[in-house]
Image: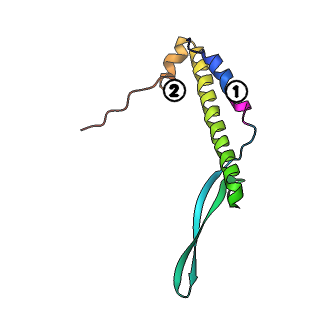
Amino acid sequence: MTVPTLQEQRAQILIQMASIDHMIRGHVSTQTYRVQRHGQIILQGPYHVLQRHQEGRNQCQRISDPELDLISSQVLAYKRYMELAERFAALTEQITWNEQSETVKKKFRRFWQPTSPKRRGS
């Protein structure tokens, strides 16, 4: 079996990205709230919330139990999309560095070559 080229890997990523038909940006969290009754604090819940940062603000919306599975799967689809986008960007950058002249590669070595961890003084 042959190893796919960087261009072939990019093409495969685009196919995977295009196969994602539904997604929702954000994060699903489970929360509880406190109610005080007759001097006792009672925890209520749990309930689920879709949270995301939009227009400079944190926005939240409660999710009903019947909606939870659908919303959660669509949030995971967005996470998968972003992972694919990051991989696509990394492959594209690798192709770009591979095509640079040796002079440019030498000057910008720390950007395209992994470095060994810095040693700490004992």
Which image quadrant: the C terminus? top left
Residue at 62 percent of width and 21 percent of height: 9
Look at the numbered disc 1 and give the secondary structure of its residue: helix
**Coloured how?**
rainbow
Residue marked by disc 1: 14
Q: What is the x, y in percent for residue 68?
A: 67, 55
Q: Amino acid at mark 1?
A: Leu
Q: What is the x, y in percent for residue 82?
A: 64, 38
- Any magenta on residue 42? no
Q: Which mark is residue 25?
A: none
Q: What is the x, y in percent for residue 65?
A: 68, 60
- Quarter of the image for residue 85 reads top right
- Quarter of the image for residue 97 reads top right
Q: Residues within 10 Å of mark 1 (few under 14, many from 20)?
A: some
Which image quadrant: the N terminus? top right
Above or below, 87 against 3 in this view is below
Q: What is the x, y in percent for residue 23?
A: 72, 43
Residue 60 in view: no
Tell me how far mark 2 sits from mark 1, CA to CA: 25 Å
Above or below, 121 against 113 in this view is below
Look at the numbered disc 2 and give the secondary structure of its residue: helix
Q: Residue furthest front?
A: 66
Residue marked by disc 2: 111
Q: Nearer the viewer, mark 2 or mark 1?
A: 1
- Magenta-tinted stretch: 15-20
Q: Residues within 10 Å of mark 2 (few under 14, many from 20)?
A: few
Q: Amino acid at mark 2?
A: Phe
Residue at 57 percent of width and 67 percent of height: 32
Residue at 49 percent of width and 17 percent of height: 106
